[in-house]
Image (tube, rainbow, N blue to C red):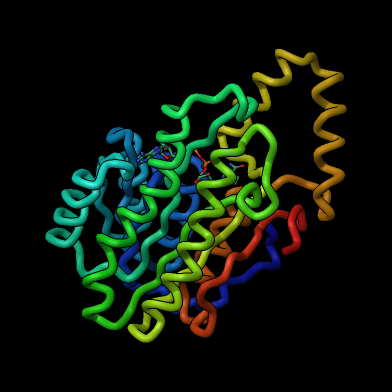
Amino acid sequence: MADSRLTSMDLGLKDRVALVTGAGQGMGRGIALALAREGCHVAINDLRGEAAHTVSAEVSGLGRGSLALCADVSEETQVSAMFKTLNERLPPLDILVNCAGIGDSGPFAKSQSSDWNRVLGVCLYGTLHSTRAALPRMIERGFGRIISIVSDAGRVGEPGLVVYSAAKAGIIGFTKALAREVGRHGIHVNCVSPGATMTDHIQELYARMKQQMGEAAFEERQKKVLKRYPIGRFGEVEDVASAVCFLASDRASFITGQTLSVSGGYSMV
Ligand SMILES: NC(=O)c1ccc[n+]([C@@H]2O[C@H](COP(=O)([O-])OP(=O)(O)OC[C@H]3O[C@@H](n4cnc5c(N)ncnc54)[C@H](O)[C@@H]3O)[C@@H](O)[C@H]2O)c1
């Protein structure tokens, strides 16, 4: 993705205030740093306080305001407390990026409802909790950008990720309905939908699979999977972060209720 011919198109994000959930690593961290590079002050939420502090220090290192907010987004009371601190410590929130998410694995027929609750709790309820907490001040100010990170699994369905697919599809429906409800208040609501993206977490998963399956079988599997990606590669964090920065900016001021797949053509819906 990194291309030296890419120069910055001014996105007009300077001094915007953003909160990214699940930003202690992976895509959330990449999105937070990309927004900071575009001039945003960025609050960093994560379940893991230490990770949130580390990324928050990275944002501060770029010369932007930041704040580490340790909270489990699946817990309504923790999200309320997080927004109380956010509202006390930073100027009003312009941009909310719902990125915290976890997946399920294995066949649905063998799954337990306790596993569903966790996946739905973090992905779907986490998005609802943070969005509802952000909305009153956005409505008051007549401005807001809400971007949720979903997954192409939620657009086309992914075996072995059945509850996750349902949770992400739920966020897509929520986004469309909310976009209709709050558009007149200057609030835009969109989703970014990645395909397989090379975060540390995915690379660790691939390393484990390689160990379990053996190198040759793993490489064969990857070749098969890549055939479903017309662009011929997996995604990088920067691919997703660029799409988020665009949707957060005024360059996207006539876009709402949409789901933008950033997946090299894995899904085309
Ligand atoms: N990596 C991929 O291939 C891929 C593909 C499609 C969609 N996504 C989505 O992108 C998002 C980020 O994925 P990633 O690969 O960077 O994940 P990751 O596991 O590397 O990072 C997720 C972060 O969220 C935090 N988190 C987990 N539960 C939380 C909670 N309840 N409250 C607050 N923070 C919590 C974790 O501590 C972690 O820092 C997720 O929503 C995921 O579903 C990822």
Image quarter in which the C terminus is found: bottom right
Image position of 181 (left or right of 224)? left
Which residue is at 59% across, 28% downward?
105
Image position of 123 (left or right of 226)? left
Image position of 159 (left or right of 30)? right
Image quarter in which the N terminus is found: bottom right
Which residue is at 62% across, 26% downward?
109
Q: Residue placed farthest to the left in the image?
A: 88
9 lies above or below 218: below
Which residue is at 81% across, 38% downward?
225
29 lies above or below 239: above
Front one among 98 and 242 = 98
Image position of 225 (left or right of 94)? right
- Tag count in the figure? 0
> Where is residue 2 drawn, in percent x and y?
66, 55
> Where is residue 258 drawn, in percent x and y?
57, 70
Front one among 202 and 116 = 116
> Where is residue 153 drawn, in percent x and y?
64, 47
Which residue is at 34% across, 41% downward?
46
> Where is residue 49 drawn, in percent x and y?
28, 35
